[in-house]
Amino acid sequence: MVIITLMKARFDGKCKSCGDDIRKGKEIAKNADDVWVHKHCVEELVDLP
Ligand SMILES: [Zn+2]
């Protein structure tokens, strides 16, 4: 089972999944590798084999 932590970004950053900027206040998620990415980027990763 994959546990995904969701929260709102407290500072600007970069998504390791798509490479786009993460803006403060945006919903982000911590993936299985302990890396912060966009919420929608994690959901895409879950579908991969
Ligand atoms: Zn992303």
Image (cartoon, helix red, strand yellow):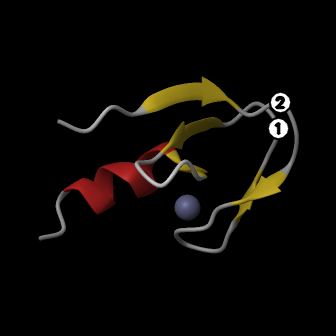
Q: Is residue 16 above or below residue 5?
A: below
CB under 8 Å between discs 2 and 1: yes
Query: For mark 2, does the 10 Å Cα neighbourhood hold few (<14), some (14 to 19), or many (20 or more) residues?
Result: few
Mark 1 — residue? 24
Q: Is mark 1 within 8 Å of ligand 1?
A: no
Residue at x-position 17% and y-position 36%? 1
Amino acid type, callout 1: Lys
| Residue 40 - label | none
Q: Is residue 24 left or right of residue 37?
A: right
Q: CA distance from mark 2 to mark 1?
A: 5 Å
Q: Nearer the viewer, residue 22 or 34?
A: 34
Q: Is residue 39 depicted above or below 6 in this figure? A: below
Q: Position of residue 41 (x, y in %)?
A: 43, 57
Percent x, y of residue 14: 74, 62
Nearer to us of marks 2 and 1 is 2
Q: Is mark 2 within 8 Å of ligand 1?
A: no
Q: Residues within 10 Å of mark 1 (few under 14, many from 20)?
A: few
Q: Residue at x 82, y 38 (%)?
A: 24
Q: Amino acid at mark 2?
A: Arg
Q: Residue at x 54, y 48 (%)?
A: 34
Give the SS element for disc 2: loop
Is 11 located above or below residue 5 in the figure?
below
SS class, disc 1: loop
Displayed-image quarter of ligand 1: bottom right
Q: Is residue 1 above or below residue 12?
A: above
Q: Position of residue 9 (x, y in %)?
A: 74, 34
Task: Say which quadrant the C terminus sits in.
Answer: bottom left
Q: Which sits earlier in the primary sequence, circle 2 or circle 1?
A: 2
Residue 42 placement (x, y as % from top left): 39, 51
Mark 2 lies on residue: 10
